Image (tube, coloured by chain):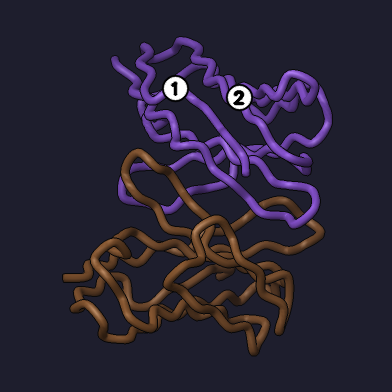
Amino acid sequence: EAQVTQNPRYLITVTGKKLTVTCSQNMNHEYMSWYRQDPGLGLRQIYYSMNVEVTDKGDVPEGYKVSRKEKRNFPLILESPSPNQTSLYFCASRDTLEETQYFGPGTRLLVL
Amino acid sequence: GQNIDQPTEMTATEGAIVQINCTYQTSGFNGLFWYQQHAGEAPTFLSYNVLDGLEEKGRFSSFLSRSKGYSYLLLKELQMKDSASYLCAVRRANDYKLSFGAGTTVTVRA
């Protein structure tokens, strides 16, 4: 089954404790992206990647890091989480020749 | 940056038609997308417009006017399951960044 998976789905952590949210897709898509969704603000793009070893900042990259060492994986790293990073995070992927973007199920993060 | 505006909420009756407008301002345009998001779920792709005109896909249609920075999503023969948030998104030409509006919550009433 074609899908985008994210782990963990729910996470409660404390300020400053490094964490990684994994994202994996099994569709051989070149393009992958991370978004955060907050009430009243909609989805905002954090980082995106057009292919392996190619990453670019979205609209809200501060406080986040990403890497794209393999085509299928695109982890989101929070080196020192802060409460303002409490949010719902979505990973997404698409084939660069198509326009349909597939979203993962989301990761709900609470930073205390 | 990009400014994307869409109404916050709309309510309609089952079987009716609802039109969700989206206006945008962008430095370089490379396509406009509509997504549907049910509460507690991930967004799902509905439509993509890059040229002016109407794209029809079953009960859903999407229209684009690039010169006016305007799009709408038309939902016909509304069903209860269409109650969801509808997200308008614009892709920028030079760097392929994708920016979303805050979303329009549509409530379908019996």
The amino acid type of the residue labelled 1 equals Pro
Cα–Cα gap, marks 2 and 1:
10 Å
Q: Nearer the viewer, residue A61 or A93?
A: A61
Query: Tag 2: Cα neighbours inside 10 Å, few (<14), some, or many (≥20)?
Result: many
Q: Nearer the viewer, residue A17 or A72?
A: A17
Label 2 SS: strand
**Quick one: quadrant of the C terminus of chain B?**
top left
Q: Name the image quarter holding residue B48.
A: top right
- Where does the image place residue B84, in percent across and percent down from the top left? 39, 34
Q: Nearer the viewer, residue B69 or A22?
A: B69
Q: Nearer the viewer, residue A25 or A38?
A: A38
Q: Which chain is purple?
A: B
Say which residue appears at 69% left-offset and 67% top-offset.
A31
Instruction: Let me know if residue B56 appears in the view.
Output: yes
Q: Which residue, as the protein is rendered here, is positioned at the far left? A: A112
Which of the numbered marks, if any, corresponds to residue B7?
1
> Which shade is chain A?
brown
Which of the numbered marks, if any, corresponds to residue B23?
2
* B93 horizontally vs A74: left or right: right
Q: Which residue, as the protein is rendered here, is positioned at the far bottom? A: A69
Which chain does the numbered disc 2 sit on? B
> Reading the chain from its start, which is encountered first: label 2 or label 1?
1
Which chain does the numbered disc 1 sit on? B
Label 1 SS: loop
Say which residue appears at 77% left-offset and 62% top-offset.
A96
* A100 horizontally vs B22: left or right: right
- Discs 2 and 1 share one subunit: yes
Say which residue appears at 46% left-offset and 10% top-offset.
B16
Query: Tag 1: Cα neighbours inside 10 Å, few (<14), some, or many (≥20)?
Result: some
The amino acid type of the residue labelled 2 equals Thr
